[in-house]
Amino acid sequence: MTVARQRLGRRAEELAAACLAEAGVLVIGRNARVREAGAGLSGELDLIGIVGRQLLFVEVKAGRAGRRSGPERPALAVGRRKQVQIRRLARAWLASAPDTPPFDGIRFDVVGVTYAADGSAAVEWIRGAF
């Protein structure tokens, strides 16, 4: 991944975290690295939050408006394979996170950030995406 692409992704995660916080989500984790050697599982959870008594795992995707390849909107880039990976990472994170606030349910959301040529951003938040 190029440095420019990493920078774009970091900006999108910051924007997504701010958007969630504005909506009352308490962000309790960002870029949470998960590694479970026995299962051959490793990866990163972009954002983890709490709203009410619901625990959120949020995948953030960024893209540029008018690009020639990939899905029409960044949020659509989270396909079945990525969904399965995020669920597995969330399970492993929960098993190793002793200080998790109490919760009654888990929700998986996706936030897509589309950047226009002028640098402005449009945020699409899909609650309960999968």
Image (cartoon, rainbow, N blue to C red):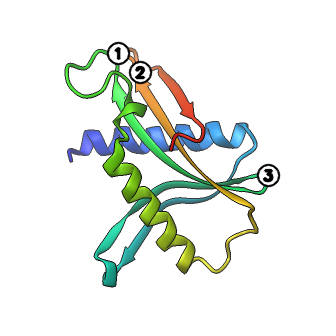
Q: Nearer the viewer, residue 118 or 92?
A: 92
Q: Nearer the viewer, mark 3 or mark 2?
A: 3
Residue underneath mark 2: 119
Amino acid type indicated by mark 3 = Gly
* SS assignment at label 1: loop
Describe residue 122's horizontal placement relative to residue 49 as left or right. Answer: left
Q: Which residue is mark 1?
A: 117
In the rendered structure, which disc, 1 or 3, sits on the residue that comes first in sequence?
3
**Which residue is at the front of the view, 87 or 24?**
87
Query: Quick one: SS at disc 2?
Result: loop
> Measured from the top left, where is residue 121 in percent x and y?
48, 23
Q: CA distance from mark 1 to mark 3?
A: 37 Å
Q: Position of residue 27 (x, y in %)?
A: 65, 54
Provide the residue designation for mark 3.
52
The residue type indicated by label 2 comes to Gly
Please report the residue visible at 28 percent of the width from the left and 76 percent of the height from the top: 40
